[in-house]
C-alpha cells in the first residue's frame, strides 16, 4: 500500500500502469457543508498494488490521465464516484464494471461491498469507522488499511461475478447496465426541478407549486454560488411555510417558522419575496412537473398495474426491481415510448410486452388464485 502525496509521484505511478487493462477505484468525500462534495481521498488498486492518493497535497487532476485511459474502471456503487470524477476531469472512464450493479443481476439486490466480498470471495472485511472524517490529516494506519480494503478486492470480485453472470447468460445485461451508468448525464440538475426533492412538495396544488418551483430554484442557485448546502440558505421548514403562505411583503416574513434574522438582512428578504412573486405568476405551462406527473391522470391506473406486473417479473427473474424498471421508467414509456424500457435487454424482456398491452394486443389477468398477474396475447381472429 502506497501513500501518494506528490503530483510527480502520482504521474510516475500511473505511467508505470499504462498497460494494465483494469483498475479498481473508490473515493472518500464529504458534502455536509459544501454544495459540491469535497474530495478527501482516492483509492486505486491494481492486481499487486494499492495506492491511496491525497488530493489535499497534490493536483488531483493528474488522475485524469488514468480516467482517460482505455482501461476499465472497476468500482462498487460507482454513481457518486463518477460524479466526482466528472467534475474533476470532465469525462467518464472508458469502460465501467460496477460490482453492485452486477450483483443485482444475480439476484442479490444492491449489496454492500462487505456483504458481497464475504459472499463471493469468502473474505470478511475488517470493521472500520464509517463516520471517519477523511479530511483530517494525518490518517492513522488503521484508517488507511480500512480505506485500502474498499478497492483491494474489487478486481478479483469482478472476475468471480463475470464467471457467474456468464453461467446465467446475463453478463451482457450487466455490462449494458454498467454502460448506461457510465454515460449518464451528470451535469448540474436544472434548478427549476429542485422543488421535486422537497418533502411534501408532491402534495402541493395550485399556486403553491409555482412558489415551490421558483423558491427552490432561487435557493439552489444561491447555494451553488456560495458553495453551501441548500438547507444552509433556507431550511426545508422555512420552505414549506413559504410555499403555503406565499408572503407579499417583508413584514409577512416575520413570524414564519424557519425564517431567521439573517434572512431579513442584506437583500435576502427581497430575493425571497421576488421568487415567491414569480412563482405565483407562473402559468400552467411554465411549471416543471416530475416525469410521473406528466402522464395523463387517466393512465395512472395503468402505471400502477404495470408496476405490479414488473415487480413480479423482477422477482421471477431474481432481479432487483429497480434494476428492471422504476415507476418513473414506466411513466416515461407510457408518455412517449422512450427511456430504459425502449432499448437494450429491457426492451426485449418487458418493453415489448408493455407496448403490446398499451396497444390493446395483450391483456393482464389474475392467475393462481389471484397470486400472480399473467400477461396474455389477445386473440384478434
Image (spheres, grey):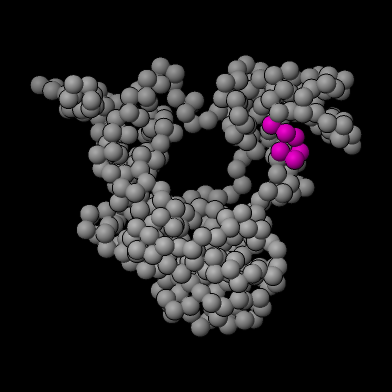
Total marks placed: 0
Which image quarter is the C terminus in? top left
From the viewer's side, name the closer residue of 344 and 101: 101
Rendered location of residue 87, percent (x, y): 61, 57
The quarter of the picture where residue 308 lies is: top left
Left or right position of 256 against 139 = right
Residue drawn where x is 34% and y is 63% of the image: 122
Residue drawn where x is 59% and y is 34% of the image: 197
**Vertically, is 26 above or below 21?**
above
Rendered location of residue 40, percent (x, y): 65, 62
The quarter of the picture where residue 42 lies is: bottom right
Specify the principal SS of the magenta part: helix
**Vertically, is 186 above or below 69?**
above
Rendered location of residue 221, percent (x, y): 72, 41
* Residue found at the very far left of the displayed protein: 381
The quarter of the picture where residue 313 lies is: top left
Q: Is residue 377 visible?
A: yes
Per the rendered image, the range of residues in magenta is 231-236
**Vertically, is 268 above or below 69?**
above
Q: Is residue 363 visible?
A: no
Left or right position of 242 against 77 = right
Residue drawn where x is 69% and y is 61% of the image: 135
Left or right position of 241 against 338 = right
Residue 36 lies in the magenta stretch? no
**Vertically, is 18 above or below 247?**
below
Rendered location of residue 139, percent (x, y): 65, 68
Residue drawn where x is 54% and y is 65% of the image: 146
Amino acid at each position: 500500500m502506497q501513500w501518494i502525496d506528490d503530483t510527480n509521484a502520482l504521474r510516475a505511478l500511473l505511467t508505470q500502469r499504462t498497460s494494465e487493462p483494469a483498475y479498481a477505484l473508490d473515493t472518500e468525500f464529504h458534502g455536509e457543508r459544501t454544495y459540491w462534495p469535497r474530495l478527501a481521498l482516492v483509492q486505486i488498486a491494481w492486481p499487486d498494488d494499492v495506492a491511496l492518493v491525497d488530493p489535499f497535497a497534490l493536483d488531483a487532476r493528474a488522475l485524469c490521465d488514468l480516467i482517460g485511459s482505455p482501461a476499465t474502471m472497476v468500482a462498487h456503487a460507482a454513481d457518486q464516484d463518477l460524479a466526482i470524477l466528472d467534475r474533476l476531469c470532465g469525462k467518464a472512464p472508458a469502460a465501467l464494471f460496477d460490482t453492485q450493479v452486477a450483483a443485482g443481476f444475480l439476484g442479490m439486490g444492491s449489496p454492500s461491498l462487505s456483504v458481497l466480498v464475504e459472499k463471493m470471495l469468502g473474505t470478511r472485511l475488517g470493521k472500520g469507522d464509517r463516520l471517519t472524517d477523511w479530511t483530517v490529516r494525518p490518517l492513522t494506519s488503521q484508517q488507511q488499511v480500512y480505506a485500502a480494503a474498499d478497492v483491494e478486492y474489487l478486481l478479483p470480485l469482478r472476475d468471480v461475478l463475470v464467471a457467474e453472470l456468464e453461467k446465467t447468460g446475463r453478463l451482457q445485461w450487466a455490462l449494458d447496465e454498467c454502460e448506461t451508468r457510465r454515460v449518464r448525464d451528470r451535469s448540474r440538475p436544472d434548478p427549476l426541478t429542485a422543488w421535486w426533492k422537497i418533502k411534501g412538495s408532491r402534495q402541493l396544488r395550485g399556486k403553491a407549486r409555482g412558489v415551490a418551483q421558483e423558491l427552490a430554484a432561487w435557493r439552489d442557485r444561491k447555494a451553488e454560488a456560495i458553495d453551501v448546502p441548500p438547507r444552509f440558505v433556507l431550511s426545508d421548514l422555512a420552505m414549506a411555510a413559504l410555499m403555503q403562505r406565499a408572503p407579499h411583503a417583508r413584514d409577512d416574513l416575520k413570524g414564519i417558522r424557519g425564517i431567521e434574522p439573517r434572512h431579513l438582512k442584506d437583500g435576502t428578504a427581497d430575493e425571497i419575496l421576488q421568487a415567491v412573486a414569480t412563482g405565483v405568476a407562473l402559468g400552467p405551462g411554465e411549471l416543471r412537473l416530475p416525469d410521473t406527473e406528466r402522464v395523463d391522470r387517466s393512465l395512472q391506473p395503468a402505471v400502477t398495474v404495470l408496476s405490479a406486473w414488473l415487480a413480479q417479473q423482477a422477482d421471477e427473474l431474481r432481479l432487483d426491481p429497480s434494476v428492471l424498471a422504476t415507476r418513473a421508467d414506466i411513466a416515461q414509456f407510457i408518455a412517449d415510448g422512450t427511456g430504459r424500457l425502449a432499448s437494450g435487454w429491457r426492451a426485449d424482456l418487458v418493453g415489448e410486452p408493455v407496448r403490446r398491452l398499451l396497444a390493446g394486443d395483450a391483456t393482464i389477468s389474475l392467475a393462481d388464485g389471484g397470486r400472480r398477474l399473467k400477461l396474455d396475447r389477445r386473440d384478434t381472429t
